[in-house]
Image (cartoon, grey):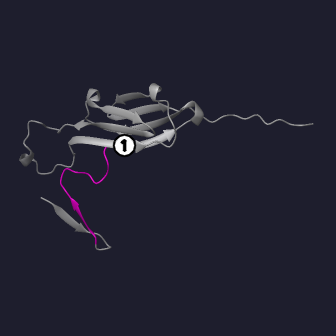
Amino acid sequence: MICHFTTKSGGIWAFLPGHAARAYPLVNVSEDANALYVTALAPGLDPSAIQLTVQDNRLTIAGEKPRVAADIQPEAFHRSERAAGKFMRTVTLPIDVDHEQVQADYKNGLLVVTLPKAEKAKPKQIAVSVEG
């Protein structure tokens, strides 16, 4: 079943049941003086099945989200809003990171990836000399 919706501008977009319009997983990217932090909301994943790669200034999160109730046939659902299946999300990082020191932790459905900044990307304190 495909539902079509018309936008105010007259354009049409399709919604396939079980597929979200947003990218998965939803992420926040923050930083402090030493590292970038990518926090991904990804409940229901097997942490050992999450694949993370860092290349250039991109972090890719990939894996597969299993169906909630594998023993129930899809046609038995009256409503299914929790998407399942393979996913891949690439986040462009705003600065260079130290690829060798990246760490990831998964707890309570939250994936936190810590990406230490490359030395050249860290802020440098510059002393101001006073001539007298």
* Residue 101 located left or right of residue 49: right
Q: Position of residue 48 (x, y in %)?
A: 27, 26
Q: For mark 1, does the 10 Å Cα neighbourhood hold few (<14), some (14 to 19), or many (20 or more) residues?
A: some
Q: Is residue 75 above or below residue 65?
A: below
Quadrant of the frame with the C terminus: top right
Secondary structure beneath label 1:
strand
The magenta stretch is 11-24
Q: Position of residue 56 (x, y in %)?
A: 44, 38
Taking the image as shown, residue 58 lies to the left or right of residue 2, namely right
Residue 61 sits in quarter: top left
Q: Residue at x 7, y 42 (%)?
A: 73
> Residue 5's x, y, as percent?
23, 67
Q: Is residue 103 magenta?
A: no
Q: Compared to 79, does 46 lie above or below?
A: above
Residue at left offset 49%, top offset 30%: 98
- In the rendered picture of this protein, how many numbered marks are placed on residues? 1
* On screen, residue 4 above or below 21: below
Q: Mark 1 highlights which residue? A: 90
